[in-house]
Each structure stands twice: as C-alpha cells, then as structure tokens.
Image (cartoon, rainbow, N blue to C red):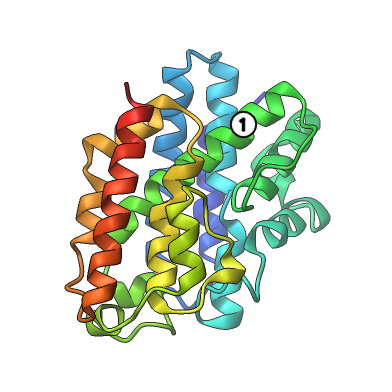
Amino acid sequence: MIDIQKARIVFKEFLNRYGDKDTPGFNLKVVHTYHVVDNAITIARKLNLSEEDVCLAELIALLHDIGRFEELSFLKQFDSVKFDHASYGVKMLFEDNLIRNFIKDDSYDEIIKIAINNHSRLTIQDGLEERTLLHSKIIRDADKLDNFRVKKEEKIEAIFPGKVRNKSDMEDSKLSYKVYNTVIAKKCIDIHDRVTLLDYWVCVLAFIFDLNFKESYEIVKNNNYINILIDRFNYSDLETKNKMEDIRLIMNSFIDCKTK
C-alpha cells in the first residue's frame, strides 16, 4: 500500500535537513520535483492506469531527484558528469534505508529503484519487465517535460548555478560540432559530449527525441516549448543563429509527426 500523503509530508521533512536553501538551484529543484509529480500523475491518468500505479508513479516522481540536493550541497552546482544524482539517490534510499521513511511496504522497491536509476540515463536499460519499464518511461517523460518548463521560466543563473553568470554567457556561446550533428540525426545528446554552454541548452531541447508517449509530445507542442526556448537568447554568432534555426525546424517537424 502506498500512503502518498505521508510520503509528501516526509519529503518536506527531508528538505529541512538542508541549511543552504538559499543556494542557487535549491528552490528550483524543489519546485521541479512537484511539477514532475504533477506530470507523472497526468501521464499515468491519461494512460488509464490503476489508482495503485498512479500513486506509484507519483511516489517515484517525488523521489526521483532526491540525490540532487546532496549534489548541490557537495558541489554548489549541478554537474551530471561529476555526480550521478540518480544512482546517489538510489544509494540514499536503498543502501541508507531512507526509503522506509516514505513507504513501509517493500514490494515496490525494485520498481522504484530501477525507475529512479533510469530516469536520467541516455537510454533505458534493456530487459526490464513490463511494469518496471512502464514506470521508467513515465518518470523519464515527466522529468523531461518539466525540464522544458524550467528552461522557460527560471533565471539562467539558477538553471546552471556555478556555470552561467548571466544571459550573455549563453548568447555568446557556440554549438560544438558533435552536439549539432547529434541533433541533426534526431538523437539525444550524451552528457559527456557537451562542451560549450549552448551545448547544455540544446541537450535539453533534444529531450524531445526520447519522449515515450503521444501525450507528452502534445504537452510540448501545446506549450510551444521549442520555439520559446530557442528564442530565449539572441545568439551573437551568425553561424550559431543559423544552426539554431535548423534545430527549430527539425524539432518542430519531429513533434508534428509524433502528434498526428
């Protein structure tokens, strides 16, 4: 049994352990978590899942970024190359036994563990059983959808604490060859291939190549995320500006195909 209201209370208590709530990015991740929860519920309900699976999707979303708060505490920035927040979150939950504060029933442990571990991977691991794969797909889509919202609404220095000082840092950046060509090939970007600040931005845009449900693509399209995120910056380099227009065309066409 999943007592989701209790889990929400415990999550708030968990956040209170951190004294550096004014660190850029902390509140962003709190708000992000709750938006991912809402996205997971929406997707699960649109898929007509049982109430049990809706609650499970909600719980996974609540816990998916629990490792991010330790990352921010350690590094004072988000760096998925130096710090694997998903695997660290799994360690906190299942090696340190934090999971039992959120849910007493251990019958969901394997699904929760695998879904969280897979939420930020380049691809989902092979060989998952059907229900585990389903929840891995739900959390991946729910997380990616809110990454679009975050990049639309939040201050650039909060999105990339420790990396970006202001908007002009991004506007003066250029795309690396490998990242640009990965997008042209309609593939997600390996985080290890990111070199420039703009690579980090385009890496998020490229999430659209890995959404799992038509409902997710409809959310992206209805919110006009691709156009808004590309237009957030006035790119100072003409070649870069032209490449971003190429990316706009490719991504919007891809979304149109997925929502037919």
Q: Is residue 167 left or right of residue 3?
A: left
How many dots with numbers? 1
Three-letter residue code for mark 1: His
Give the quarter of the figure containing the N terminus: top right
Instruction: Return the residue nearer the eye: 98 or 218.
Output: 218
Please provide percent x and percent y for residue 137.
58, 34
Please provide percent x and percent y for residue 83.
65, 72
| Residue 17 seen from this side | no
The answer to whether 182 is drawn above or below residue 44 in the figure is below
Mark 1 secondary-structure assignment: helix
Q: In which quarter of the image is residue 192?
A: bottom right
| Residue 146 seen from this side | yes
Instruction: Return the residue nearer the eye: 62 or 15.
Output: 62
Q: In this view, does 260 lie to the left or right of 67?
A: left
Q: In this view, does 86 lie to the left or right of 220?
A: right
* x 31%, y 51%: residue: 149
For label 1, the crowd category at 10 Å Cα-Cα, with few meaning under 14, some 14 to 19 and many 20 or more, is many
Instruction: Return the residue nearer the eye: 158 or 203.
Output: 203
Please provide percent x and percent y for residue 53.
59, 22
Q: In which quarter of the image is residue 66?
A: bottom right
- Residue where numbered disc 1 is placed: 135
The answer to whether 242 is drawn above or below residue 137 in the figure is below
* x 64%, y 52%: residue: 121
Give the quarter of the figure containing the C terminus: top left
* x 53%, y 24%: residue: 54
Instruction: Return the residue nearer the eye: 149 or 97.
Output: 149
The answer to whether 234 is drawn above or below residue 129 in the figure is below
Q: In this view, does 79 lie to the left or right of 34?
A: right
Please provide percent x and percent y for residue 19.
50, 77
* x 43%, y 70%: residue: 199
